Amino acid sequence: MKIPKTYAEWSVCLDVFEAGGNDDEAIEAMRAGSLSWTGGVAPLFARRTSETVDVRLKRIADGMSRALHLGGDATTLARAMLDARQKLVSVYQLAALPVFADELRESLQKQVAQYAETAQKALEDSAKHDRSGQLASTIRNSSLLHFRVSAAATEATGGGSQAAASRTSTNNNTSVATQQRRRNILT
């Protein structure tokens, strides 16, 4: 992907990010990009970037709602929340790009944080009706609010593709451990 320097090039990168298919590639290109913060470009760019973040947050909410409506067990809930949290990491990485003006960066990060807090609170409120406490426990353990920690870990490992490989490795190890546990319980 071309490293953006003009508003038009930035628009292409934001379109790619908004579509959601190549987040890592788009973020890396934008991280290396530059933009002249002139009077005419700054408000347009800020609005365009905020709209991109908003579209992605709405898509995260829709995806989580769809997943929760398809299956109501704790495992489905945990998977939907962890998937949403990983997507929040990508959006937060966009919001935290150092090329953005401080005011824009703070505004975008606040936008992501407010979504996570609102969604987490709504999930916790919905779990109050579950007498077993299992849903509340799942929601706390899979909290959307940990997206910043995941974003920092992704940055520390050098980007999204390495983090994805790490997640896959962790998921495979968990599956093996779960299978072994199940085998031990059944014998």
Image (tube, rainbow, N blue to C red):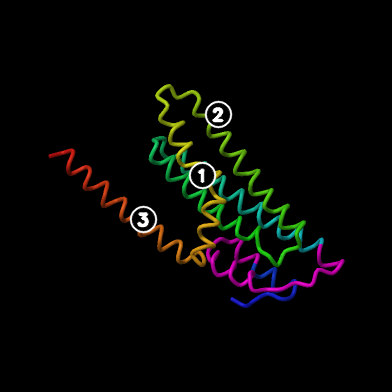
For label 3, count other residues whose C-alpha is less than 10 Å away and answer few (under 14), some (14-19) or many (20+). few
In the image, the segment drawn in magenta is 14-42
Which of the 4 quarters of the picture holds residue 7?
Answer: bottom right
Residue found at x 81% / y 68%: 37
In the structure shown, which secondary structural element does the residue marked by tag 2 occupy? helix
Instruction: Return the residue found at the far bottom.
Output: 2
Disc 3: which residue: 170
Disc 2: which residue: 125
Instruction: Return the residue found at the far front.
Output: 156
Q: Position of residue 163 (x, y in %)?
A: 46, 62
Helix, strand or loop for the magenta stretch, by majority: helix
Q: Position of residue 103 (x, y in %)?
A: 77, 56
Q: Quadrant of the N terminus?
A: bottom right
Disc 1: which residue: 64
For label 1, count other residues whose C-alpha is less than 10 Å away and answer few (under 14), some (14-19) or many (20+). many
Question: Residue 147: within the magenta?
Answer: no
In the structure shown, which secondary structural element does the residue marked by tag 3 occupy? helix
Q: Is residue 137 above or below residue 58?
A: above
Which of the 4 quarters of the picture holds residue 138?
Answer: top left
Q: Quadrant of the C terminus?
A: top left
Q: Which amino acid does the dot numbered 1 rest on?
A: Met
Q: Which amino acid does the dot numbered 3 rest on?
A: Thr
